[in-house]
Amino acid sequence: MDFLAWGEVLLRALLSLLILFVMTKLMGRKQVSQLTPFDYIIGISIGSIAAELAVNRDTPIAEGVIGMVVYGLVAALISVATDKNLVLRRFFTGKPLLLIQHGKVCEQNLKKAKLDANDLLSQCRMAGAFSVDEIEHAILEPNGQLSVLKKTEASPVTPPQLSIAAAPAVLCAEVILDGQLMRENLRRIGRDEEWLTQELKTQHAPAVRDIFLALCDENGKLSVFARGEVTKPLDVLE
């Protein structure tokens, strides 16, 4: 491949990346945060056209660009239409499915969702419920995620239920990440390396290079997770 051919491939790749960026902005963040099957197909199609446009010199640039723009515009128009029309929303994105109701598994909906028992258990674990007995209702959302409402006796007790005042939640800053000291994050929370060194000594923590993750909240509470802290798992999952 001569220099001109390399240059053409480079220009094609940059052009396809530019159009992909514009299409992503046009379709909005919903494409990433709430990926439905239709969104997935649109994304794969646009990506395939972009790759073809970048490396296949026999593909006319105008045709590739038009194809990407058409897919992007269709996705954007459908997004607008589904925001305004409930029937179209259910048609394109689907509707939630109740997989567990009052602690009982809804086998009919499980079949509609093309899920088996192992899939259901896996989804429940990812939602924080390690036993189906804990669940009152479980709903499969249109984007494939499982929303779980635990039974009252399995739900954690909240401070209002105990009639006690709770401290406000605080954000945590990463001060050590994969053995690297995050000096800028330390500065932002009003701490310095001397303070961190003293805290690590107090907790008998290893050296910075041997720490996988260290978090510090706004109140100065330091949580340290060292490398090599391995627990042998109980192999009971299929």
Image (tube, grey):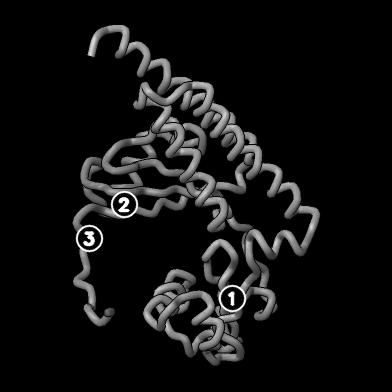
**Residue 32, above or below 100:** above
Q: Which of label 2 and label 3 is nearer to you?
A: 3
Distance between mark 2 and mark 3 Cα atoms: 19 Å
Q: Are marks 1 and 2 in contact (CB under 8 Å)?
A: no
What SS does tag 2 mark?
helix
Task: Identify the residue at image location x=42%, y=43%.
Answer: 174
- From the image, tell me which residue sits under label 2: 202
**Residue 12, above or below 216:** above
Residue 234 position within the rendered picture, expressed as x and y whole percent measured from the top left = 23, 78
Q: Neighbour class for label 3 at 10 Å: few (<14), some, many (≥20)? A: few
Q: Which of label 1 and label 2 is nearer to you?
A: 1
Label whose residue precedes the other's in the sequence (1 or 3): 1
- Which of these two is toward me, 16 or 104? 16
Q: Quadrant where the C terminus lies? A: bottom left
What SS does tag 3 mark?
loop
Task: Identify the residue at image location x=57%, y=89%.
Answer: 153
- Which of these two is toward me, 139 or 220? 139
Residue 11 position within the rendered picture, expressed as x and y whole percent measured from the top left = 41, 15
- From the image, tell me which residue sits under label 1: 139
> Which amino acid type corresponds to the residue marked 3 in the rendered image?
Glu
> Which amino acid type corresponds to the residue marked 2 in the rendered image?
Thr
Label whose residue precedes the other's in the sequence (1 or 2): 1
165 to the left or right of 68: right
Task: Identify the residue at image location x=65%, y=38%.
Answer: 73
> Which amino acid type corresponds to the residue marked 1 in the rendered image?
Ile
**Residue 61, above or below 138:** above
Distance between mark 1 and mark 2 Cα atoms: 46 Å
- From the image, tell me which residue sits under label 3: 229
Q: Neighbour class for label 1 at 10 Å: few (<14), some, many (≥20)? A: some
